[in-house]
Image: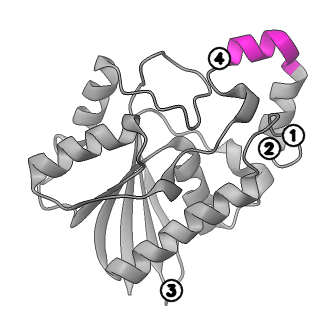
Amino acid sequence: MSLHLEFLRHGEPAGGPRYRGQTDDPLNENGWRQMQSAVQDLPADRWEAVISSPLRRCREFAEWLARQRGLPLQLDARLKEIGFGAWEGRTYAELKAEDEEAIRRFYTDPVRHRPPGAEPVAEFRARVEAALHDLLATYGEGRLLVVAHAGVIRAAIARVLQVPDRAMMRVRIPYAGRVGIELDGERGDALLYIR
């Protein structure tokens, strides 16, 4: 029994690059173009269903794509981005100017040096892994599109590669980037591709 999950990161949100975490910004026009371009050459029957974070930058595109392709859509709150606490809505440049060392420590070890009020990495990974477990239990086999956030995709990759929590931020996922993983109860999980 194996389930192929094709993750699609949301495109560029309104407001530009910043730590938005669970801030519910929509995609901007460029973000919509990025997302549409990422799937335009993929066959209509590639997926059995679309699963999405309920945050607008994922959900609105997932709803559109599900309608276009005649696919069922499931929203799962466990696929929301990690909460960045006091960093929500702030840019990298702002935070670096304020405390460059805090940024460096976070990317080196987000477990011990998370932003004030941020969601603990272990709790974040646990909720993402619970969502993946439930997808495998519900669908068993086949191929699903999961429209989500960079952090969620990092957590899925970290699960497959058994990466420790502190190293999770070392994976870069571009806007509208695609990552394939396979959940396989017999042979073990596998990272299939990053595009």
Looking at the image, can residue 176 be seen? Answer: no
The answer to whether 39 appears left or right of 136 in the picture is: left
Q: Is residue 94 within the magenta segment?
A: yes
Compared with 77, 65 (above or below) is: above
* Residue found 38% across the figure and 87% down from its top: 1
The stretch of residues the image draws in magenta is 92-100
Q: Which residue is mark 4?
A: 91
Tag 1: residue type?
A: His
Q: Which residue is mark 2?
A: 110
Give how far across and how far down residue 136 sits, in percent. 42, 78
Q: Quadrant of residue 169?
A: top right
For marks 2 and 1, give the CA distance: 5 Å
Secondary structure beneath dot 3 equals loop
Q: Which of labels 1 and 3 is toward the front?
A: 1
Compared with 185, 172 (above or below) is: above
Q: Which residue is mark 1?
A: 113
Give how far across and how far down residue 75 sits, in percent. 36, 56
For marks 4 and 1, give the CA distance: 18 Å
For marks 3 and 2, give the CA distance: 31 Å
Give how far across and how far down residue 104 sits, in percent. 83, 29
* Residue found 87% across the figure and 27% down from its top: 102
- First in residue order: circle 3 vs circle 4: 4
| Label 1 neighbour load within 10 Å: few <14, some 14-19, many 20+ | some
Tag 3: residue type?
A: Arg
Q: What kind of secondary structure does the magenta stretch mostly adopt?
A: helix
- First in residue order: circle 1 vs circle 3: 1
Tag 4: residue type?
A: Thr
- Rendered image: mark on residue 187: 3
